[in-house]
Amino acid sequence: MSNDFRIPATLWYDPQPSSPKFSQAFANLAFTLQPGQSASGPSIALLGVYELGWPYTELYGGQIPKPITVVAIHATSGQVFLSDLNPAIEDEEEDAILPLMSDEDAAGPGPARNALRESGYFNVDLCALLNLPPDQAYYQVFLWLDDLVTPIQTVQVPANPARKGTGQSPYEVKNGDLLAFGASPKSPKAVAGVIRTDLDFQAGKSYRVQGTLPPGALDTPPTGGASGSPVLTVLAFDRQSRLYAWNASTAAYGKMKSSAAPYFNFDPFRLISQPKSPENVYVVTVLGNVRNEVLVIFTDYQRAP
């Protein structure tokens, strides 16, 4: 892909020659990454498409694609940089997404699944939207909307002294003993190409996310081309409060490799505060360029039986 591609703004909506094609899937997010030149110098353009039906159209109404979150994880440190598309939209009074429907209402009866579909394009200057640091580095990039998460793409972001990012990203939970390692009777069975995660819980009492790496992950590190060992990063999101939290471990992969046991676990509510009033919490786990399907801690799981 050519570095001659012009990046005209932090966010724009026109389809580009390299934009993904629509798939006619019921719920789909997709993107491509393209090096280019912005007004401040070399950068990376993320060219995205969305095709969304119920419940997303009811949850967010005419606000789509603003709640779609762009995530980039520094491949060496595990630092997480993220933003939804709302802050990039100028000349609008609101500065936060206000969901139109509660999680519990969304779980109830709804319209036919082929109704009220929305689709469109969006493009962002990845470095500007996420305020990335000026150094050249590899990042693992994906899109996230509630229970939807795209495959990860690894990209080398070019150096650009004009970028003013400090490398300190918000929402970090510096909890050194969050992750534990070793097999459990509740550890899920390994599946090729993805991290498996299951919730081990007693409703309203105790919670543990049990994770298993894909087969071969300890033999061939899933780095996506970045140097060094992959970092294990866990992220959580409370949809109605719009709160994120994340924790990264640069030592996790080495611990699992040395014990030849591709298992880990953690308490998600030591990562993100348990909602006082039950709300869906979404958990994403990333190791290099592999991730889980979003694990949802539903409102019903958070109530005492």
Image (tube, grey):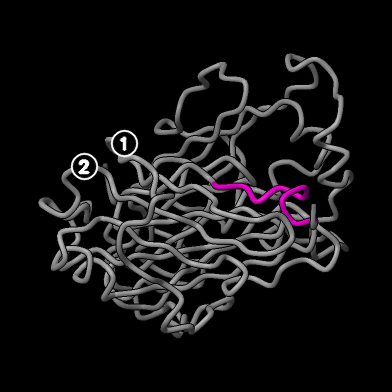
Circle 2 crowding by C-alpha within 10 Å: few under 14, some 14–19, many from 20: some
Q: Depth check: 231 or 202 in front?
A: 202
Image height of 257 relative to 17, above or below: below
Q: Which residue is mark 2?
A: 215
Q: Compute the Cα span from label 1 to label 2.
A: 7 Å
- Residue 261 shown left or right of residue 243 in the figure: left
Q: Furthest residue to the left?
A: 219
Q: Amino acid at mark 1?
A: Val
Q: Which residue is mark 1?
A: 191
Does the residue at mark 1 contact the one at mark 2 (Cβ under 8 Å)?
yes
| Sequence-earlier tag: 1 or 2 | 1
Q: Amino acid at mark 2?
A: Pro
Magenta stretch in the rendered image: 295-303
Circle 1 crowding by C-alpha within 10 Å: few under 14, some 14–19, many from 20: few
The image quarter containing residue 103 is top right
Q: Depth check: 121 or 53 in front?
A: 53
Which element type, helix, strand or loop, lies under badge 2? Answer: loop
The image quarter containing residue 204 is bottom right
* Residue at 34% in and 50% down: 212
Coordinates of residue 60 in the picture (x, y in percent): 80, 42
Coordinates of residue 182 in the picture (x, y in percent): 30, 63
- Residue 81 shown left or right of residue 27 in the figure: left
- Look at the image and say whether residue 119 sits in the magenta stretch: no
Which element type, helix, strand or loop, lies under badge 1? Answer: loop
- Look at the image and say whether residue 296 sits in the magenta stretch: yes
Coordinates of residue 132 in the picture (x, y in percent): 44, 72
* Residue at 56% in and 29% down: 28
Q: Depth check: 95 or 43 in front?
A: 95
Q: Quadrant of the N terminus?
A: top left
**Residue 199 numbered tag:** none
Image height of 165 relative to 203, above or below: below
